[in-house]
Image (cartoon, grey):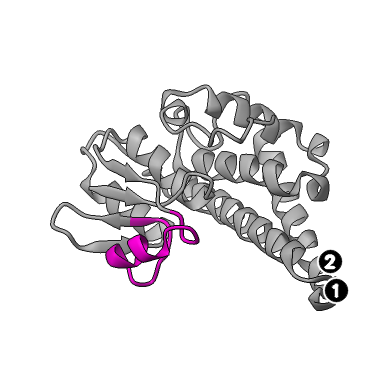
């Protein structure tokens, strides 16, 4: 299989970490959706990262759908999702919050790049409030554990939340006042020290922030 996309995307990085955690072999092609559009479009005309090229050549996209697929092809003793329904419920709640944090961080960055005359402050206020709300809701879960969010082992909830956290710290640290989230910071530090995260290091211009 081949994973297409830059690791500065939290959506690409969460898939890459999951592939390593599940011991699924893959090649990584770090094509940018901006700088490498012609090459990317030859693989996926929609130019969407992450893109996963399966062993039979079929192309998948959307990080959540790709993660559902790799869960199905992983070894039976390997999973990043809880079997128990209550824990599964908690996991997908936290994954949803983490994805929201990623989405809102991207929107914050795009708004900042607009020409000043095209920026709309009420919209900026709204997306920033949504970003803060995501971390406000994650923090109690992270603060109540010195281990992982759902199980005694890492799940996709931990991966998604921690990848989102590092991405937001890079892009919008001034928006979230990160010192308000010591539980998430500690969780992120544990995650970045794990083998799966170390196998997918933050891009060279990034520095992990906890």
| Secondary structure of residue under mark 2 | helix
Residue plotted at (57% across, 49% down): 94
Residue plotted at (46% across, 60% down): 33
Residue 122 badge = 1
For residue 80, say whether it is visible.
no
Q: Is residue 52 left or right of residue 48?
A: left
- x%, y% of residue 139? 71, 41
To which quarter of the image does residue 50 belong? Answer: bottom left
Please tell me whether residue 178 is drawn above or below residue 122 in the rendered image: above
Work out which quarter of the rendered image holds the C terminus and state it: top right
Residue 160 badge = none
Number of numbered tags placed on the structure image: 2
Residue plotted at (50% across, 40% down): 159
Please tell me whether residue 49 is drawn above or below residue 9 in the rendered image: below
Q: Which residues are magenta?
A: 32-51
The reply to whether the magenta stretch includes residue 98 is: no
Q: Is residue 188 left or right of residue 143?
A: left
Classified by dominant secondary structure, the portion drawn in magenta counts as loop
The reply to whether the magenta stretch includes residue 44 is: yes
| Secondary structure of residue under mark 1 | helix
Please tell me whether residue 200 is drawn above or below residue 64 in the rendered image: above
Q: Residues within 10 Å of mark 1 (few under 14, many from 20)?
A: few
- x%, y% of residue 70? 29, 49
- Tell me whether the residue at label 2 lies in contact with that at label 1, contact meaning CB atoms closer than 8 angstroms: yes
Q: CA distance from mark 2 to mark 1?
A: 5 Å
Viewer-side residue, 20 vs 115 = 115
To which quarter of the image does residue 178 belong? Answer: top right
- x%, y% of residue 48? 42, 64
Residue 125 badge = 2
């Amino acid at each position: 299989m081949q994973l297409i996309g830059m690791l500065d995307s939290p959506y690409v990085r969460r898939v890459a970490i999951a592939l390593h955690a599940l011991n699924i072999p893959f090649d990584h092609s770090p094509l940018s959706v901006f700088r490498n559009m012609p090459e990317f479009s030859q693989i996926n005309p929609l130019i969407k990262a992450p893109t996963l090229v399966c062993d039979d050549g079929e192309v998948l996209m959307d990080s959540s759908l790709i993660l559902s697929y790799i869960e199905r092809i992983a070894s039976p003793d390997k999973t990043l999702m809880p079997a128990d329904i209550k824990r599964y419920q908690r996991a997908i709640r936290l994954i949803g919050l983490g994805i929201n944090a990623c989405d809102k961080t991207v929107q914050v960055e795009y708004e900042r790049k607009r020409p000043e005359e095209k920026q709309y402050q009420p919209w900026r206020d709204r997306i920033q409030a949504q970003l803060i709300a995501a971390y406000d809701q994650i923090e109690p879960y992270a603060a109540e554990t010195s281990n992982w969010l759902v199980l005694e082992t890492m799940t996709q909830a931990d991966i998604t939340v921690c990848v989102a956290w590092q991405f937001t710290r890079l892009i919008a640290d001034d928006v979230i006042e990160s010192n308000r989230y010591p539980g998430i910071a500690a969780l992120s530090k544990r995650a970045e020290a794990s083998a799966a995260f170390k196998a997918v290091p933050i891009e060279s211009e990034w520095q992990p922030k906890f």
